[in-house]
Image: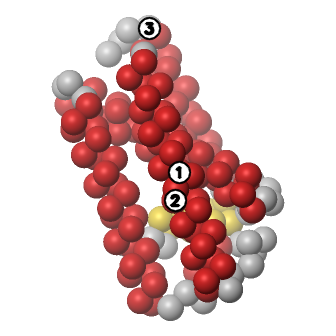
Amino acid sequence: MERFLLLALFGISMAHFEGVVVVYLRKALGIDHTRDNKEAVEKIPKEIILIEQTREAATIVMLVTLALLVGTTWLDQIIVFLWTFAFWDLFYYVSLYVVIKWPPKLTTTDVLFLIPKPWIAPVWFPVAVSSLTIIAIVVVKLMHLV
């Protein structure tokens, strides 16, 4: 279980790092922190969207690489990826809220991902999926199913 605590710490650290990048990006582009991101993404220049897509792709590559390095079987690698992804996704919103009090509520619309095009949903959706993923993996690990 120590390995999964360290992976959670990695995901939380990545989340904060990404959250800080987003805060700086919003500030540089003059985007209000209380506005729904669906509206904000339409104002971002295309070249910045392309750069953001490469950042998102790099994030996924980092998570896959970590899973391949740490996982002992293909199933363990998938679990490691999902676990770390869930902590990264969940704590991204925690980090933004701590730093800039965004999102103001869980029903606030966000752009969840930009690849291949913007995925838009209320913040509660990724928070719920990530939370359920973490809970499911804990239950599976406690029951020693994998």
Judge whether 131 appears above or below 48 on screen.
above
Q: Which one is in front, 42 or 54?
A: 54
Name the amino acid, label 2.
Answer: Glu
Q: Which one is in front, 46 or 119?
A: 46
Q: Inspect this view and state whether residue 24 appears.
A: yes
Q: What quarter of the picture does the N terminus occupy?
A: top left
| Label ID, residue 18 | 2
Disc on the earlier residue, 2 or 3: 2
The image's colour scheme reads secondary structure
Q: Which residue is mark 1?
A: 15
Other-residue count near label 2 (Cα within 10 Å), few / some / many at <14 / 14–19 / ≥20:
many
Name the amino acid, label 3.
Answer: Met
Disc on the earlier residue, 1 or 3: 1
Q: Nearer the viewer, mark 2 or mark 3?
A: 2
Other-residue count near label 1 (Cα within 10 Å), few / some / many at <14 / 14–19 / ≥20:
many
Q: CA distance from mark 2 to mark 1?
A: 5 Å
Q: What quarter of the picture does the C terminus occupy?
A: top left
Residue at 29% across, 41% down: 66
Asked whether, in this view, residue 67 is left or right of residue 53, the answer is left
Image quarter for residue 4?
top left
Where's residue 102, x and y in %? 74, 61
Where's residue 108, x and y in %? 73, 63
Name the amino acid, label 1.
Answer: Ala
Residue at 44% across, 39% down: 10
Q: Which residue is mark 3?
A: 143
Q: CA distance from mark 2 to mark 3?
A: 33 Å
- Pointer 2 and pointer 1: residues touching (CB < 8 Å)? yes
- Pointer 2 and pointer 3: residues touching (CB < 8 Å)? no
